[in-house]
């Protein structure tokens, strides 16, 4: 299978300047892909593009991975309806360090070169930039961008000169990397298409050389229809301090049947034959969610490592009731307490008190109503009694749940 065939099968073909996608297979490219440090972590949206980059590397292309220390000082206005708030220099520096660490973890074992566009912009004099870059970028090209038209329109919120000029900075990135390292391909997400084309045009005007762009499609949340981005509510982060490995694992376990196949192709390195067999087994009994669990295993291991993935899997199994909570190790219990509330209770103590103490009910009255309605479960079994019994506890612990969603659970431990 060629790279273009691999990318096509996995769903990584969006827009490209290649007249035919198979032209990608005719030579080896030096390419770059980058992320601005607008946060101290990437999200699963960035992860999709990082996985696309991995395929370029695996097929022998040389990767330059950019952390946008300069562009991050402005922030890409494309897709934004109003002006971004500028980050402090200290925040940008911290975010750059965090992104670089994530790059190294994601591309561990791959040959990459990390570059920072602040390095070539920090000593770039303003007048020199206008003469050497701005002089070669037509204003019509910048004004024609859709987001500019929207922001300058009657219902728009306007745009500052700084954000308007963002495209010039990113265009120069492409030119600089081309001039310094012979980079002649930019790999990006579809939302960077316009900025990338500006880079190609600047390369042509300044050097007479040609360059290419390969833009993968944006990955969209099937529930919200919004791209998986940093500003989206409920964003899934790659930083374990922002989205725990268990929560990250469960995000993939909860993938819809309609998307799990495409996610296996996009977010894992499993080959075509392996994924076909997984989907075949999944379709035989979708309730078992075999495809979702395999997806969660693979992606969590890529982002957080095999040990964290295995721990996240075990915690999830306790939560869904496929493993007995009494068998949980100290490490597993610590991870479980990090995911759900916990409380102490005694044998013969009122269940109502544990529901309130754990936050599963807002008051004693609400807790009693939940019990009466059969909405409270102990280890997957519905109960309607008032007190805990000795048999409820296994190794001094049980899982108390409100309703059928395992996320509404609490760990109840026996008072010593």
Image (cartoon, grey):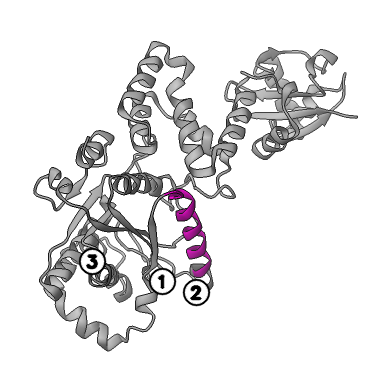
| Magenta: main secondary structure | helix
Q: Nearer the viewer, residue 80 or 95?
A: 95
> Residues at badges 1 and 2 in contact (C-beta under 8 Å)?
yes
Labels 2 and 3: the sequence-earlier one: 2
In the image, farthest residue toward the top: 284
Query: Residue 134 at what x, y percent from top left?
Result: 20, 79
Separation (CA) of disc 1 from disc 3 = 26 Å
Label 1 residue SS: helix
* Residue pointed to by mark 1: 73
Q: Is residue 102 magenta?
A: yes
Labels 1 and 3: the sequence-earlier one: 1
Label 2 residue SS: helix
Quadrant assignment, res 32? bottom left
Query: Residue 405 at what x, y percent from top left?
Result: 57, 25
* Residue pointed to by mark 3: 182
Quadrant (top left/top right/bottom left/bottom right) for the N terminus? top left
Quadrant (top left/top right/bottom left/bottom right) for the C terminus? top right
Tell me the number on the disc at residue 89: 2
Image vertical order of residue 39 relative to residue 328, above or below: below
Q: Nearer the viewer, residue 298 or 415?
A: 298
Q: Nearer the viewer, residue 260 or 51?
A: 51
The residue under the point 24% across, 63% down is 183
The region drawn magenta spans 93-109
Question: Relative to residue 294, is residue 194 drawn left or right?
Answer: left
Query: Residue 327 at what x, y percent from top left?
Result: 73, 22
Label 3 residue SS: loop
Image vertical order of residue 48 relative to residue 35, above or below: above
Give the foreground label among 2 and 3: 3
């Amino acid at each position: 299978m060629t790279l273009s065939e691999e990318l096509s099968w996995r769903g990584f073909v969006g827009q490209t300047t290649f007249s035919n996608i198979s032209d990608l297979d005719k030579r080896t490219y030096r390419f770059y892909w980058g992320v601005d440090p607008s946060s101290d972590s990437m999200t699963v949206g960035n992860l999709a593009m990082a996985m696309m980059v991995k395929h370029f590397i695996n097929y022998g292309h040389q990767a330059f991975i950019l952390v946008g220390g300069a562009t991050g000082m402005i922030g890409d206005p494309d897709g934004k309806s109003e002006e971004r708030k500028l980050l402090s220099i200290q925040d940008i520096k911290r975010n750059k360090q965090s992104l670089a660490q994530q790059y190294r973890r994601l591309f561990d074992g791959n040959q990459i070169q990390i570059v920072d566009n602040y390095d070539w912009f920090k000593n770039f004099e303003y007048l020199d930039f206008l003469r050497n870059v701005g002089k070669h970028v037509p204003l019509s090209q910048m004004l024609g961008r859709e987001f500019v038209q929207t922001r300058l329109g009657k219902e728009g919120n306007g745009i500052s000169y700084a954000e308007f000029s963002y495209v010039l900075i990113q265009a120069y990135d492409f030119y600089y990397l081309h001039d310094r390292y012979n980079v002649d391909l930019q790999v990006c997400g579809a939302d960077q298409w316009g900025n990338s084309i500006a880079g190609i045009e600047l390369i042509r005007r300044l050097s007479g050389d040609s360059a290419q762009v390969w833009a993968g499609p944006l990955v969209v949340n099937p529930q919200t229809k919004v791209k998986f981005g940093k500003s989206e509510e409920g964003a899934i982060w790659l930083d374990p301090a922002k989205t725990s490995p268990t929560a990250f694992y469960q995000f993939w376990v909860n993938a819809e049947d309609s998307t799990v196949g495409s996610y296996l192709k996009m977010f894992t390195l499993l080959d075509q034959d392996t994924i076909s067999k997984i989907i075949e087994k999944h379709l035989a009994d979708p309730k078992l969610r075999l495809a979702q669990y395999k997806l969660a295993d693979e992606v969590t291991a890529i982002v957080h490592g095999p040990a964290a993935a295995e721990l996240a899997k075990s915690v999830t199994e306790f939560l869904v009731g496929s493993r007995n909570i009494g068998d949980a190790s100290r490490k597993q219990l610590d991870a479980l307490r990090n995911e759900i509330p916990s409380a102490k209770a005694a044998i013969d103590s009122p269940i109502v008190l544990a529901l309130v103490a754990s936050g599963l009910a807002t008051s004693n009255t609400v807790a009693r109503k939940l019990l009466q309605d059969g909405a409270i479960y102990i280890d997957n079994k519905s109960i309607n009694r008032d007190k805990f019994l000795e048999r409820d506890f296994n190794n001094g612990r049980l899982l108390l749940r409100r309703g059928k969603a395992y996320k509404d659970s609490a760990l109840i431990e026996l008072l010593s």
